[in-house]
Image: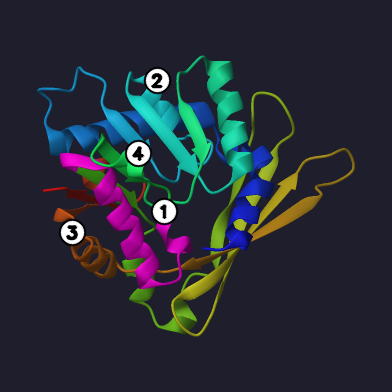
Amino acid sequence: MNDDTRDFYDALAPDYVGLFPDWEASMTRHGEVVEALIDGALGTGEAARARLVLDVSSGIGTQALGLARRGHQVLGRDLSPEMIARGRDVAARLGVALTLEVGDMRRARAEDAGRHDAVIAMDNSLPHLDRDEEIEQVFRSMLLALRPGGVALVSTRDYDSVLARPPAQRPRFDPLRLHTPPAGPRRISFQLWDWDDDDRYTLHLVMLDEREGGWPSVTRRARYRAISRATLTRLARAAGLREVEWLMPSESGFFQPVLRARRA
């Protein structure tokens, strides 16, 4: 992860909600599903109380806002100052009590130590990291922030199905999506993936907004690494997390595979 990743999300912040057919409905659904994933690890006996949750890759708050609306005490951090600023605006508009601040998920903070019931990093954020050492550091930082018995959640794309293909057959195009917001112009978005010779790729996010006389486009680029579930499991265990398991969308209700692990 580097300045290019931060710049990608800074530039995307004003347009982010426009990538969803209905972002608020998605935010509500994500809050419900992530709460259920946390309860599945910690039990439902304490579900009525507000849990302390740290979201280390919050973006504008798609999961953090959803959890806060459900009564949990959530602290969200993100590398992008613009995403954080946009998330604060959204939280204020919705009247949601949520703390958002700029932060790097690789950097442990002393004030987090042993404090949180759950630490989450959703929506394919870890694959921005190029090296195993960086990913293990994220898991170590998550471990530090968890109370004993606390739960860590990480979601990624289903890269196992991608890596099972020969390099020449890996996906290079994400289907077109037409977004029709209640107010404002229609938008078309799609992704192009340019693969390196290994498991790294450049994602080109192309957005076209309907305007009088045409559909002008803008393209934003980000780097990713296709990381297998076995690699993430190994790194989570090396960092000290225990009871590492993977929940697929058919089981979890989340749109990506989810790694769930515990602090002993």
Residue 185 location (% of width, % of height): 74, 33
User: In front of the other: label 4 or label 2?
Assistant: 4
Q: Can residue 114 be found in the magenta stretch?
A: no
User: Is 227 or 149 nearer to us in this picture?
Assistant: 149
Q: CA distance from mark 4 to mark 2?
A: 24 Å
Residue 33 visible here? no
Counting other residues with Cα less than 10 Å from the Cα at mark 1, is it few (<14), some (14-19), or many (20 or more)?
some
Q: Amino acid at mark 4?
A: Glu
Residue that badge 1 annotates: 107
3 or 4: mark nearer the eye: 4
Q: Earlier in the sequence, mark 3 or mark 2?
A: 2
Location of mark 3 (residue)? 240
Question: Which residue lies under the disc numbered 2?
Answer: 69
State how far apart marks 1 and 2 are (Cα).
Answer: 27 Å
User: Which residues are the magenta region?
Assistant: 126-150
x, y percent for residue 215: 80, 47
Amino acid marked by disc 1: Arg
Tell me the mark number nearer the camera, choosing from 1 and 2: 1
Which label's residue is closer to the chain start, 1 or 2? 2
Give the residue type at disc 2. Arg
Q: Which class describes the residues within 10 Å of circle 2: few (<14), some (14-19), or many (20+)?
A: many
The answer to which of 150 and 257 lies nearer the viewer is: 150
Cα separation between marks 1 and 3: 16 Å
Circle nearer the N terminus (1, 3): 1
Disc 1, SS: loop
Number of the label disc, if any, that sits on residue 111: 4
